[in-house]
Image (cartoon, rainbow, N blue to C red):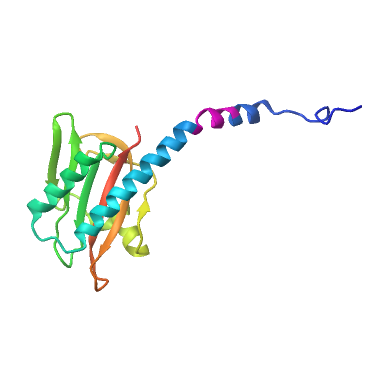
Amino acid sequence: MNNIFDNVNYDTCLWKNYLAIFKHKKLVNHKDKIKGLIQESTEELAEYFQRIPSDIDNIFASLQNHLQNNSVIFASAFAFSPEINSCCPFVFRDITGFKSRDIAAEVPYTKAVWYEIPVKQSKALWSVPYFDIDKAGEDILLTTYSIPVFDPNSRLVGVVISDLLLA
């Protein structure tokens, strides 16, 4: 009697890939869980910012609170629509705690992929991984979850983001 596997040519590379995927399934599930947590907390922050925040100090405090409550998030920002305010409060983690600054003067944020594409598509998106060179003081690999924020009249208020370090 012939064994059904007698004529099968096992590709060693294929098996190694399969085993690697199986071995790291737990890691992949963990990353998906982290991304889900980031999405959920960033969506809550976006709902808060729908009321067209005007007090910049309050925005910085809200962003820092967002980071304090979500230890997996490296940085967060609220980039205003230029029709409302040319301002982009940004808060990030540092070895000494949190640092914050308005990056609008140094970054043409409305042309950044994390701002422009979600606004054009009118939906929340994850960016492809990219190097953020010297924005937070060092070269880092990250991905950004961006949510365009609209007021009740469907006017763009800005974009809220959360950064996930990939290194």
Image-quadrant location for residue 138 = top left
Please state the extent of the stretch shown in magenta in the rendering.
Answer: 19-25
* Residue 11 visible in the picture: yes
Please tell me which residue lies in front, 144 or 113.
144
Q: Residue 55 at x, y = what percent?
A: 8, 57
Q: Residue 19 at x, y = what percent?
A: 59, 27
Q: Is residue 72 left or right of residue 15?
A: left
| Number of marks | 0
Query: Mostly what secondary structure, the magenta segment?
Result: helix
Quarter of the picture containing the N terminus is top right
Q: Residue 25 at x, y = what percent?
A: 50, 33
Q: Residue at x 17, y 68 (%)?
A: 83
* Residue 135 visible in the picture: no
Please tell me which residue lies in front, 145 or 120.
145
Q: Residue 107 at x, y = what percent?
A: 20, 50
Quarter of the picture containing the C terminus is top left
Image-quadrant location for residue 91 = top left
Q: Residue at x 36, y 40 (%)?
A: 34
Q: Residue lying furthest right in this view? A: 1
Q: Magenta stretch: residue 56 in it?
A: no
Question: From the viewer's perspective, is residue 157 above or below residue 25?
Answer: below
Q: Is residue 12 left or right of residue 71?
A: right
Q: Residue at x 20, y 56 (%)?
A: 79
